[in-house]
Amino acid sequence: MLLDQETENEIVFELCQLLGRAILPLTGSDGPGTPPGVPGTAFFYSELVGATDDGEIAHEWLLTADALTDRAYGEIGLRPSVTDPAEGADEPIDLPGFAGHWLHLPELGLAAMPTGGLHGYADDRGWRWRTQQVTEAVAAPADSVARIGAAPASAFVLALGVGDGGARPLEAVVERVARDGGEVRVTTELPAGYVGAPVFAVEAGPDGGPALRCLGVVLPPQAGGHPIATFDRIRAALAAVVAD
């Protein structure tokens, strides 16, 4: 769906409110004190896997581009808005053996981290996470992904950019997505820090108004744009892992 500029601006504002606390900055390197690698973004995804008499059962993952996670050492940044109390964000999460913390799905270009260790990290230090998640309801189903055609459609990328002095500001940009052969792509190259970020499209909701759908994960740039690891394939891959 290609939207007018006013509607796009309204959706950017809504996206920051609904999911601004779903994303974290991350960077890999060869070790403490060594030059950092490519800065990227990761985001929380809550996958509904069943229900009991006590309520729904969900698996929570931290998703990003696999290319960001193949380093010996990594750092996941924290922001005061995602920790309670805010002082929990004073120091980043340092992860020696960074690549080993992730489930690698190279056929998708995706890496997924179960978040149990992140919650344990917070508990050990006396704070708790105060995040939002891309939920099952927001993650695009297969038919939504299939409706992305060759004609450019409005898309929205929510990321932590790279500012002065290494700052990682929350940013949301309006872009275009289109299908190119067998893949869905962001049609232009994005700024530093955007690889691994969630990308969203809009379709008509049940009430006729615009409904946000997370198409998937922004992958490293290729040919002037970015392939997207789409949620139709992400769901299937994670389901296979959980089943094993």
Image (cartoon, rainbow, N blue to C red):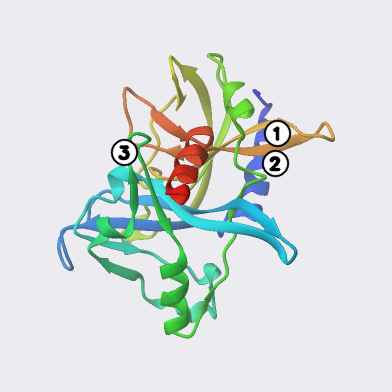
The local secondary structure at tag 3 comes to loop
Above-or-below relation of 204 to 63: above
What amino acid type is highlighted by mark number 1?
A: Glu
The local secondary structure at tag 1 comes to helix
**Residue 136 visible somewhere in the drawing:** yes
Q: Name the one closer to the observer, 169 or 84.
A: 84
Q: Name the one closer to the observer, 51 or 112.
A: 51
Instruction: Measuring from the top left, give residue 232's x and y in whole percent.
Output: 53, 33
- Report the mark closest to the observer, 1 or 3: 3
Q: What residue is pinned by disc 1? A: 6
The quadrant in which residue 36 appears is bottom left
Q: What residue is pinned by disc 2? A: 10
Whole-Å distance between the Cαs marked 1 and 3?
38 Å
Asked whether the residues under the numbered discs 2 and 3 touch, taking CB atoms below 8 Å apart as contact, a structural biologist would say: no
**Residue 161 visible somewhere in the drawing:** no
Position of the N terminus by quadrant: top right
Instruction: Measuring from the top left, give residue 216's x and y in whole percent.
Output: 50, 38
Q: What residue is pinned by disc 3? A: 106
The local secondary structure at tag 2 comes to helix
Asked whether the residues under the numbered discs 1 and 3 touch, taking CB atoms below 8 Å apart as contact, a structural biologist would say: no
Instruction: Measuring from the top left, give residue 63's x and y in whole percent.
Output: 44, 50
Instruction: Measuring from the top left, give residue 38's x and y in whole percent.
Output: 27, 48
Judge left or right: residue 117 versus residue 142.
left
What amino acid type is highlighted by mark number 2?
A: Glu
